[in-house]
Amino acid sequence: MTGTFRGDALADGILDALRANPAAARASLLVLHDASAPPAAAYAARIESFAPRAGFPVTVRDYPASLTELRALLDATQGAVLPIHPLPGWIDAPTLTEMLGPDRDPEGLHPLHAGALALGRPGIVPPTADAAFRVAEAIAGPLSGRTAALVGASPVVGRPLALLLIAAGATVRVAQASTRDLAAETRDAEIVFSAVGRPGLLGRDHLCKGAIGIDIGITRQGDRLVGDLDADSLNGHASWLTHVPDGVGPVTVACLMCNAARLGGAEV
């Protein structure tokens, strides 16, 4: 039988430890999103549902209507600020990252955070990458000596996750959805992570018998959410698959809250 990993208990443990830390109460988090974009609205709603357990104020609101209004909002805001994609058309991601600076960036995308991670001194790590790493540890135990394959190399997930795995002593192979023979890059790995957003991209031919599948690439199809891993074909073949969307998803929000607390001065 293939086990299904749900991240709720892992997320609860992270949040319980966070709330027990008195220094975390000094933190705050402002979440900006476009409420008309369903994925952004869903992510914002999940963050809002976790807010009472974080132990510090969390505010969710729509993007301001202009760059001038955004500057004014940021000038009046203390603490972490999370801009959820898609961004408004009047600003791009590099500009917004620069406006936030490293001290308000809970996504870990500022060059100072990304550079520290690349040098093996992680501080603010992109929450989804952090969550996927923690989920893999929760299922497999220590990752030193393990073989892992990542499909997708975005700055938000794939690249930082690869660096976390390397720092943990894992042997890591990184592939893309466009890799010519994708199965050849993944089928020998003990743990396969996919963060592409292409439903059913990886099936039985892509994972070896008994492998662990960590599904990060979630896509909405009609009224349901589906992952990159073809769960039907992998049932009985993989040892573990993460639930979509409640495998990595809740742990991502818990890791986001930890980053906001770190930016507020807490050691978590």
Image (spheres, rainbow, N blue to C red):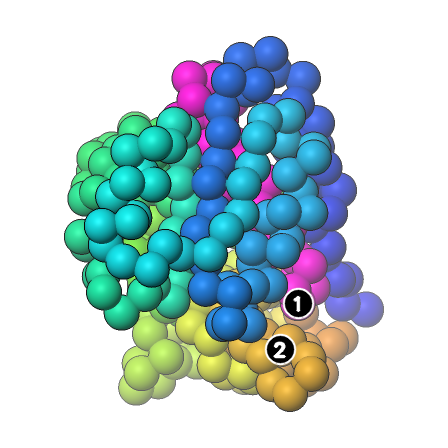
Q: Is residue 32 left or right of residue 173?
A: right
- What residue is drawn where x is 55% and y is 19%? 24
Residue marked by disc 1: 244
From this view, report whether residue 121 is shown above or below residue 183: above
| Disc marking residue 226 | 2
Q: Secondary structure at mark 2?
A: strand
Give the magenta part as a residue range. 240-268
Q: Is residue 267 magenta?
A: yes
**Residue 263, x across and y down, in percent:** 39, 26
Q: Is residue 122 left or right of residue 227?
A: left
- What residue is drawn where x is 29% and y is 48%? 70
From this view, report whether residue 163 is shown above or below residue 227: above
Q: Amino acid at mark 1?
A: Val
Density class for disc 2 (Cα within 10 Å; few <14, some 14-19, many ≥20) is many
- What residue is drawn where x is 50% and y is 51%? 61
First in sequence: mark 2 vs mark 1: 2
In this view of the protein, which residue sits in the foreground, 145 or 138?
138
Q: Check whether the beta carbons of the residues at disc 2 and disc 1 lie within 8 A of each other.
A: yes
